Image: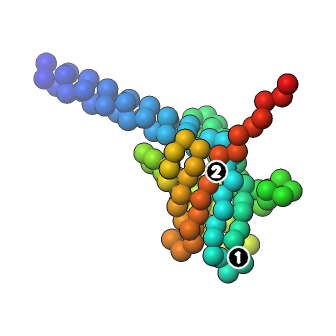
Amino acid sequence: MKRIIVLLTLIVMCTTIWAQQADNAAFFAGKWNVTVTATPMGDVTLLMNLKMKEGKLTGNISDPATGNEVAEIYSIEVRENSITVSFNAEGYDVFLSLDKKDENNLTGNMMDMFDATGERVVEKAEK
């Protein structure tokens, strides 16, 4: 009987943890204007597009001026209130770590060297 109770407790705990991770990932889904400051090329702004697909985040990095994709995100790691995305930019593997500041803002860094901030792009409703 004790084994059954322990097994059921483990199942409930695992289900709760999995559901929480899905909620955390859903928070980051959408478009984010990300500004990386003090890079060798000056301040850089990029558009991070994240979508939920089959329960996981996928996405790409686009040029905010043209909307053209510049890099596919090949790895996304979601934690409780943070995300790390990895992509290839001009032949270099780059990672961007961002923490949730509030519902529409992120703070963090790129490559543990350059400060980064992100702001959710709010789509305007058509009339």
Q: Is residue 37 above or below residue 108?
A: below
Q: Position of residue 127 (x, y in %)?
A: 85, 25
| Residue drawn at the location 74% of the way across and 72% of the way down | 90
Residue 95 showing in the rendered view: no
Which residue is tagged 1? 42
| Residue drawn at the location 67% of the way across and 81% of the way down | 40
Residue 39 appears in which quarter of the rendering? bottom right
Determine the secondary structure under disc 2: strand
Q: Residue furthest bottom?
A: 40
Which residue is tagged 2? 119
Q: Residues within 10 Å of mark 2 (few under 14, many from 20)?
A: some
Q: Residue furthest top?
A: 1
| Residue drawn at the location 45% of the way across and 39% of the way down | 21
Q: Position of residue 94 (x, y in %)?
A: 61, 68
Q: Position of residue 5 (x, y in %)?
A: 19, 22
Residue 65 appears in which quarter of the rendering? bottom right
Q: Amino acid at mark 1?
A: Gly
The residue lying toward the viewer, choosing from 56 and 38, is 38
Question: Are the residues flagged by discs 2 and 1 in contact, CB closer than 8 Å?
Answer: no
Q: Which mark is residue 33?
A: none
Q: Amino acid at mark 2?
A: Glu
Q: Is residue 99 above or below residue 26?
A: below
3D distance between C-alphas at marks 2 and 1: 19 Å
Determine the secondary structure under disc 1: strand
Residue 22 showing in the rendered view: yes
Q: Residues within 10 Å of mark 1 (few under 14, many from 20)?
A: few
| Quadrant of image for the N terminus | top left
53 with respect to 81 (left or right): right
The residue lying toward the viewer, choosing from 101 and 84, is 101
19 with respect to 127 (left or right): left
89 with respect to 26 (left or right): right
Earlier-in-chain disc, 2 versus 1: 1
